Every structure is written in structure tokens, then in C-alpha cells.
Image (spheres, rainbow, N blue to C red):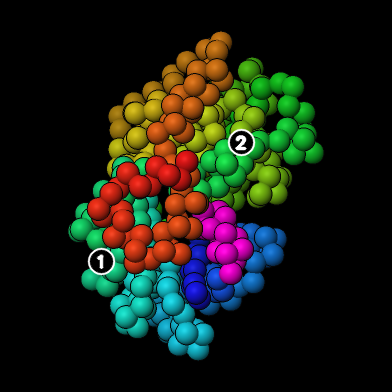
Amino acid sequence: MKILVQLSHPAHFHYYRIAIDNWQKDGHEVFVLIKSKDILEDLVKNAGIPYININEKSHRKSKLGILWDMLLRDWKIFWICIKNNIDILTGSTAEIAQIGWLLRKPAICTGEDDADVVPTFVRFTAPFLNIRLAPVSCNGGIMDNKTIKYNSYHELAYLHPNHFVADKNVVEKYFPTNSPYFIIRFSSLNAHHDKGIKGINANIAQKLIDILKPYGRIYITSERELEPQFEPYRIPIKTLDMHHVMAFSDLYIGDSQTMAAEAGVLGVPFVRFNDFVGRIGYLNELENVYQLGYGIKASELGSEERMYDVVKELLDMSDTKEIWQQRRQKMLSEKIDYAQFLTWFIENYPESKKIMKENPDYQYRFR
């Protein structure tokens, strides 16, 4: 079988990486398409995965530019499918749905964002959608009638214990692990769905540093340019080592959705501060059902003080790591290994769709 996978964000690389490897080992030919987005191309190169960059130059400065880029990607994907006689397409983009519909090919869209968070994606995807895979915690809106729900998270495609074991030796290439340390993350918040979203600004970051400093070391990772006073805290770590560093940290604070979820599934307390709080199902579940983190809506009155209070409370707990690992084990006991499920679903489509429709509990074979 010939499988086309479109990656458009570094997070997509992580949750498709193991499935791609599985498909190749099972004898399938996999065509990986990417666009130039942050460190995505470096990740694919470093993993030794052959790929085609179908969007090297971005025109994201306007809505017209974003639409133009999408149409260019559509055109390129169309001809790659024709030239290589692709059997099935998958990815987290509108283009996968559009080209699948146009060529009458099976197209499996993947996603974990709720529909009201990504309305533009829904607008350009829903009319063409063949089938979508999403967590049970995700509200897909009008896409739900074409969605197969699974009980897991994208982050468990690569951070499930079946695939990831934290290694202190990796962390100690950068710094010692014999004393507490904390990670602060700044997102760029410049995607089309981030318009009007507030996060951690310089004043908040400085206050957090003042609170954390008496308790341990502080490291900052950032998508955006840092103010000069924060440069001494910047963490110069290889991307694929970051999950090891995260796993041994004592606390994560940030305005990134993905890194908050990664901390949660690793059993590291997280404090998420932005205006997406309350709107994203899988993070609501990690926070409210499994109590692995705290979401604080940035625009609410008194939100900054509430965040500082939560951070202080976590810092003063004596058995935080033990409690969080117990909560993590409960979460893991109820979730499936998403990478293995995704591998099976694509390899066995459309029979896999029929099986999941008739017997959703079949997914629990993938532990």
C-alpha cells in the first residue's frame, strides 16, 4: 500500500513518527510531505525520513496569502498522488480532506482541537471530509458525524511508556538533575486561530521567575524572541531531548497547549496560562478529570494572581512528584497507545472503520 502523510507542524511529526516507522516495517511505501514550519524540517531530517517540502515559502501575512498557500499545497499533493498512485492519505490538514474528495481516495484526517477553536480549519475541511480520528474528549462540531473517537491523546503516540522512557543521562548532557528545576514556555501565538489570544508577557514572566528562584533552577524555552533579561534562562536543548528534560522537571508553566499536554502525560504538574483555557477538550480532561495540571484563562479578572497562587501552592507541596505519578498511572490505565491504534487503523481501512463503528471497545487491544 502507498500511504501519503502530510505534516504541517512539529507536533505532527511527533505523533506520526512511530506510525510511519511501523508502516515502513510492514512493507508499505510512505510518502511524507511537509511545509516549512518552525523546526519541522529539521525534525524530519534528523529522523532520517525521506520527505518532500511542498511549501518552502510562507505567505501567512494575510488571509489571501494563507488561502494561496493552501491552494498551492492542494495542487502539489494532487499531482504527487497521481504520479505515485497513492492508495490512502492522512494528516491534520484541510488539504488531505480536499484532495481525498477530489480523487475519491480514502483520506483519514487526524486532529484533537475542538471545532470552535479552529473554525477556519472546519470551514475548509468539513465539506470534503471522508473520515476523521479524534480523542473522545474532542468536540468536532459538524465533523463529529464523520469522526471515529478513540480514548487517548496525540501526545500518547510518542510519550506512551511503550515508546518513551525518560533518561537522566540525556538531561545531564545539559545540566545536573540532583536539584529541582522548572520550565517556562513562551509560545509565539501567531497562528490564524491565535488572534486575540493572550498569554505570558514579560511582566508575568518576571514575576514567575521571582517566585520560582528560591526553589530551584529556571529554564525558558521560547518560540518568540526573548527580552534581554530572560536570555540567561534560555534552554539550548535539542528538540528530541526536550521530552527527557521535561520528564525530570518539577513544574511546567507556559502558554503552549502541546507542551502542557506533554507535561501532563509525563506526570509533571503543569500550569497553562492563555485564553484557550476551557475551550480544548483534551486539556480540560487532563486538568479536570485526571488533575494533572491547571488551566487559568489569561483574560479573566485576577487571573495573574490566581496563577501565582497555584504556582506557590505546588512549590510548597512536599510529595508532588509521587501524587502526580499516581494520577498519571490512572490516566494511562484508561488510555490506549495511539501510535499502535493509528498504525492499525490506516493499514486496515476501511475494515477498521467498520470495526470501530460496530465495536468501539476494539481499540482497547492497543494498550
Would residue 111 be visible to someone looking at this image?
yes
- Label 2 sits on a secondary structure element that is helix
Residue lying at 23% horizontally and 71% vertically, measured from the top left? 127
Q: CA distance from mark 2 to mark 1?
A: 36 Å
Instruction: List x then y, in percent, for residue 218.
Output: 65, 30
The residue type indicated by label 2 comes to Met
Residue 38 occupies quadrant: bottom right
Label disc, if present, on residue 217 of the rendered structure: none
Relative horizontal placement of residue 92, taking residue 202 as reference (left or right): left
- Residue 347 lies, in percent from the top left, at 45, 64
Q: Residue furthest right?
A: 173
Q: Which quadrant of the view contains residue 159? A: top right
Helix, strand or loop for the magenta stretch, by majority: helix
Magenta-drawn stretch contains 299: no
Nearer the observer, 22 or 195: 22
Residue 130 image offset from top left, x and y in percent: 29, 69
Q: Decide which of tag 2 and tag 1 comes sooner along the chain.
A: 1
Q: Name the spot of residue 88 as percent of width and height, x first.
A: 42, 73
Q: Nearer the viewer, residue 110 or 206?
A: 110
**Residue tagged 1:** 126
- Image-based side of 270 in relation to 119, left or right: right
Residues in magenta?
Answer: 14-27
| Residue 87 sits above or below residue 349 on the image | below
Q: Which residue is mark 2?
A: 246
Query: Would you identify the image quadrant in which residue 190 lies?
Result: bottom left
Q: Name above or below for residue 85 compared with residue 25.
A: below
Mark 1: which amino acid? Ala
Q: Is residue 144 above or below residue 300?
A: below
Asked whether the beta carbons under mark 2 and mark 1 sit within 8 Å of each other, the answer is no
Residue nearer the viewer, 336 or 221:
336
Number of marks: 2
